[in-house]
Image (spheres, coloured by chain):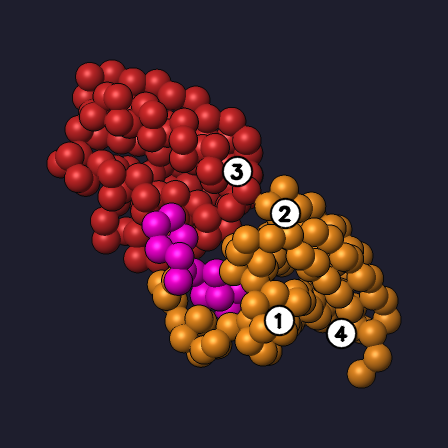
Amino acid sequence: MKPINKMILKTDSRSINESFARICVSAFAAQLDPDIEELSDVKTAVSEAVTNCIVHAYPNKVGEIIIKVFIYENRTVKISIKDKGRGIEDVKKAMEPLYTTLGGERAGLGFAVMESFCDRISVKSTVGKGTTVNLTKIFASRTYENE
Amino acid sequence: MAVKISSSPMRVTVSLSGEIDHHNAAVIRMEADEAIQSKLAPNVRLDFDEVTFMDSSAIGFVLGRYRIVESYGGNVEVINLTRRQFAMMKLAGLENVVKLKTKK
């Protein structure tokens, strides 16, 4: 299936860009006229993925985060969040709720939140090369009273 | 993002507003802990009434405060949660350790 619209965003892995990234993606997805809850789902999932890039992919340096958003005809939005950071050794383990390598104030819920707010999620990672998280969100069809 | 603190001998209330993500959780944490650790009140209330966005960093924030308050024998309650925020906190099992209250 071919997307009907797309955008690419490249930004530094600085924590100040977490809000910038989620606002950008949700602003772009807004053209599908989702409801506020659905848009919050997108914002929250993107925030988790971008935070992962900042704290895990590039722990002691600033790297690049590449976000691509594709919009399809059937009210579907696909978001890929890619980094060229250190990668994840065990993706399955990383996705387990409450698992965190950082401890302290990180709840270990990033992937669990992404899973609960998106329709599909896939993670590809190569140690030393980086990680790509693909999120799919399908917005409910809207019915309008006057139609 | 802003943090407002009010306190009585029995309670410290930390009122949060704006967006809670990994970026601004650090500042919120510092301000909240300063108040919590200087008062050691038996009850710590985290008020989410004016929180417009949160991701799992807010869950980490609540969990972190719970650990501190629990260490001196106090308890934590989180109030004025939206249904969405409440659901996210439940996802983390927070309702087992702190009292969660939704908005009226």
Q: Pointer 4: what residue?
A: A74
Chain A's shade in the image? orange
Query: Can residue B28 be seen in this snapshot?
Result: yes
Q: Residue at x 34, y 25 (%)?
A: B34
SS label for mark 2? loop
Circle 2: is it few (<14), some (14-19), or many (20+) Cα within 10 Å? some
Whether residue B103 can be seen here: no
Residue A130's tag is 1
- The one nearer the camera, A18 or A130, is A130
Residues at marks 3 and 1 touching, judged by CB atoms closer than 8 Å:
no
For the residues labelled 4 and 3, say whether their Cβ atoms are less than 8 Å apart: no
Q: Judge depth for marks 1 and 4 and give the one in front.
A: 1
The residue type indicated by label 4 comes to: Asn
Q: Which residue is mark 2?
A: A14
Q: Chain of mark 3?
A: B
- Residue A109 among those drawn in magenta: yes
Which shade is chain B?
A: red
Badge 1 density bin: few <14, some 14–19, many ≥20, Cα 10 Å:
some
For badge 1, the amino acid type reads Gly
CA–CA distance between discs 1 and 4? 31 Å
Nearer the observer: mark 4 or 3; the answer is 3
Amino acid found under the numbered disc labelled 2: Arg
User: Which of pointers 1 and 2 lies earlier in the amino acid sequence?
Assistant: 2
| Image coordinates for residue A143, horizontal then vertical, percent | 71, 62
Residue for point 20% across, 17% down: B9
Residue type highlighted by circle 3: Asn
